[in-house]
Amino acid sequence: MKMLVHDLEQREFETWYGEVDADTIVVSDNGRIRHCIGCFGCWIKTPGVCVLKDGYQQMGERLSKCDELVIVSRCLYGSYSPFVRNVWDRSIPYLLPYFATLNGETHHKNRYDNHFELNVHFYGDDITEAERETAKSLVAANAINFYAKENHVHFHNSLQELKGVLQ
């Protein structure tokens, strides 16, 4: 299964992406996503499920079932857009609260035995070289933290460049 997380307006997404096949889960901004409040409820009260009931509480489980995670985000200062960053934060139930040392670094243990491929497509017409380097480092760190088997970062000057790339 493929999961596609994007920050586009719905009409823009439909025009740009076209028809979504049955093996793809699309995560987009429905205007109801709440910010992670750091309560650790997804680890203690409802293991693996966020306690905030807004339609995004199953992000950890969704990640556990995907082979490929594709992110389409406006590049802001070398990072994701606020919506996409929020989806990452709400995906913390994918991990356990316990720690492991990997390559001399401390990381959360993996809750699920799943290792997806992470493909990130940043768009924007004025992405600087410094922002590109920051974004590459960020995606690499996310890949390590979420046990991705590999990661790829792509930069596009416009959404038009993306059209057809992901289908």
Image: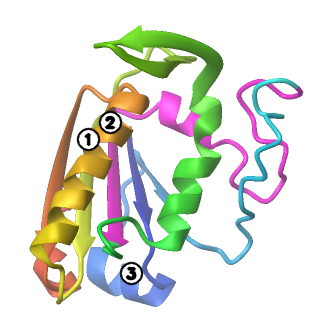
* Rendered residue at 84%/53% (across/down): 53
Q: Quadrant of the N terminus?
A: top left
Say which of 45 and 4 sits in front: 45
Query: Residue under circle 3?
Result: 14
Residue 18 in view (yes/no): no
Task: Give the numbered dot on residue 166.
Answer: none
CB under 8 Å between discs 1 and 3: no
Secondary structure found at label 1: helix
Which tag is nearer the camera, tag 3 or tag 2? Answer: 2
* Rendered residue at 41%/35% (across/down): 66
* Rendered residue at 32%/36% (across/down): 143
Picture quadrant of residue 35:
bottom right
Is residue 48 in the magenta section?
yes
Q: Amino acid at mark 3?
A: Glu
Picture quadrant of residue 150:
top left
Secondary structure found at label 2: helix
**Residue 91, placed above or below residue 85:** above
In the image, taking residue 58 as reference, residue 117 lies left or right, namely left
- Alpha carbon distance from label 3 to label 2: 28 Å
Query: Residue under circle 2?
Result: 143
CB under 8 Å between discs 3 and 2: no
- Density class for disc 1 (Cα within 10 Å; few <14, some 14-19, many ≥20) is some
Span shown in magenta: 45-73
Q: Amino acid at mark 1?
A: Ala
Residue 72 in view (yes/no): yes
Q: Position of residue 48 (x, y in %)?
A: 71, 28
Query: Residue under circle 1?
Result: 140
